[in-house]
Image: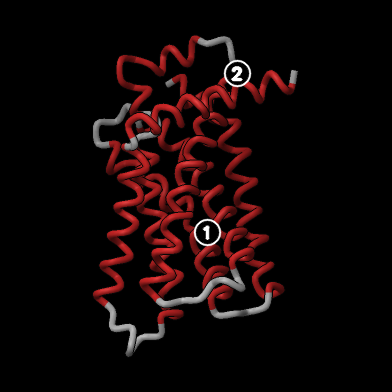
Amino acid sequence: MLMDYFSKIWAIMWKDIRGELRTKEIFSSMFIFSLLVLVIFNFSIDLLEVNPLDIAQGVLWIAFTFSGILGLNRSFLFEKENDCIQGLMLTPVDRSVIYFGKMLGNLVFMLVMEAITVPVFVVLFNISIYDKIFSLIIVIFLGTLGFVTVGTLFSAMSVNIKAREVMLPILLFPIVVPIIIAAVKSTGLILSGSPFGEIVSWLKLIIVFDIIYLVVSFLSFEYIIEE
């Protein structure tokens, strides 16, 4: 029974991934935007006068956050075309399967974008992360998970709104502020070489909000998608 549940989640996630492999619309727009943010900040700040470690973590998460919004905006947009969302809802699966499938698809897109963005960030800001890569991966993954968890819910909520490109960030940003702040603080401590023990409290905060957002999104998605 459990394997069948996960296989249905995988089917929905793989459908999104295959569609993206054909069009490359979501990933290309996310990566180009994140690259643009890094380049603009790099050329607008004199790194000879400003310590890169004072701003790097904020720049990195600005790139991740706003690029993620672009991806989330298109998450349910493809399903809306030709009423494909109705086809999903008519399939004999629990509504949570649709949520987890879409959420995991969005998570994969963001993680791939981040995996390519981070090396560019390291080169532009001349920051060494080779001895901190494991801690950085943990923070980026947990922060992205919380962002995508609640972002997928709001993406489904805003898909039928004409001004969805505006409404999604308005709805999402106030909710994900705790995760973004904790992720920025954690990233800053990692980049500055602080011991892992100093980062744990921020990681705990991210994990708590990840769990809260996941439970709330899981319980409320069925009612939102029906609307």
How crowded pointer 1 is (Cα within 10 Å; few <14, some 14-19, many 20+) is rated as some
Q: Mark 2: which amino acid?
A: Asp
Residue shown at 41%/13% (left/top)? Answer: 86
Viewer-side residue, 109 vs 155: 109
Instruction: Check disc 1 and report the residue beneath it.
Output: 178
Query: Based on the displayed image, in which of its 4 quarters is residue 52 positioned?
Result: bottom left
At numbered mark 2, what does the secondary structure look like: helix, strand or loop? Answer: loop
Q: How far separated are the C-alphas under marks 1 and 2?
A: 30 Å
Q: Mark 1: which amino acid?
A: Pro
Whether residue 173 sits left or right of residue 32 in the image: it is right
**Image: 200 above or below 176:** below
Residue shown at 36%/86% (left/top)? Answer: 50
Q: Position of residue 63 (x, y in %)?
A: 37, 59
Instruction: Check disc 2 and report the residue beneath it.
Output: 94
Mark nearer the viewer, 1 or 2: 2
Whether residue 114 sits left or right of residue 1 in the image: it is left
Viewer-side residue, 133 vs 217: 133
